[in-house]
Amino acid sequence: MTKMKLFALSAVIVLISSTILSACQTALSTEQIQNTMNAAVNQTMTAMPTATKVPTATATPTPSATPTPQPVQYGPTNFPDNVDPLTGLIVADPSILNRRPVMVKVSNFPPWGRPHAGLLMQILSFHIPRVC
C-alpha cells in the first residue's frame, strides 16, 4: 500500500471511532445547561475589582554632557612613530618599522573592499587564483 492509502485508511478509522465514542455520551438536559450558565454568570457578577496602584513620582536624573570621542584618522602619511602602517597596531619597538615588508596579502573579500590602492607600486606581484 502506498502512503496516501495508509493515510486515508487511518483517517477513516479515526472518524468512525470518534463517531462511535461520541454516540455513547449522554446529552445534558436543558436544566443542567441552564444551571451551568447561571453559575458562570454569577461568578462574573460577583468578581471583585482589584485595586490599581497609584503611580509614585520618581526623580529624573539630570543629563550630563558626555564628551564625544574623536575618531583617530590615520592615513598613508600621518602614522605615529610607534604604529605599524600595515596592521594599524602599536609596536613595542618602533625600529622594526624601518624594515621593508617581505610579503603582504591583499584579500579580494569582501567585494566592497575593492579596488585596492597602491598595488601598482610594488616591485614584484603574484596573483594566486582561488581554486574551488
Image (cartoon, grey):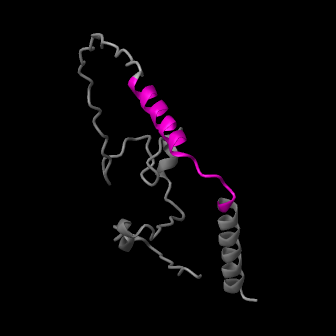
Give the residues drawn in magenta, as a range: 23-45
Residue 110 lies, with reference to residue 80, above or below; the image says below
Q: Name, please, the residue furthest toward the bottom.
A: 1
Tell me if 22 is positioned left or right of 98 in this view: right
Whether residue 93 is visible, yes or no, is no
| Residue at 69% from the left image edge and 70% from the top image edge | 14
| Residue at 52% from the left image edge and 47% from the top image edge | 96
Residue 90 lies, with reference to residue 25, above or below; the image says above
Residue 38: image quadrant is top left
| Residue at 36% from the left image edge and 74% from the top image edge | 120
Q: Nearer the viewer, residue 15 or 41?
A: 41
x and y percentages locating residue 40 in the rendered image: 47, 33
Name the chief secondary structure element in magenta: helix
Quarter the N terminus occupies: bottom right
Q: Is residue 19 magenta?
A: no
x and y percentages locating residue 103 in the rendered image: 53, 65
Tell me if 23 is positioned left or right of 100 in this view: right
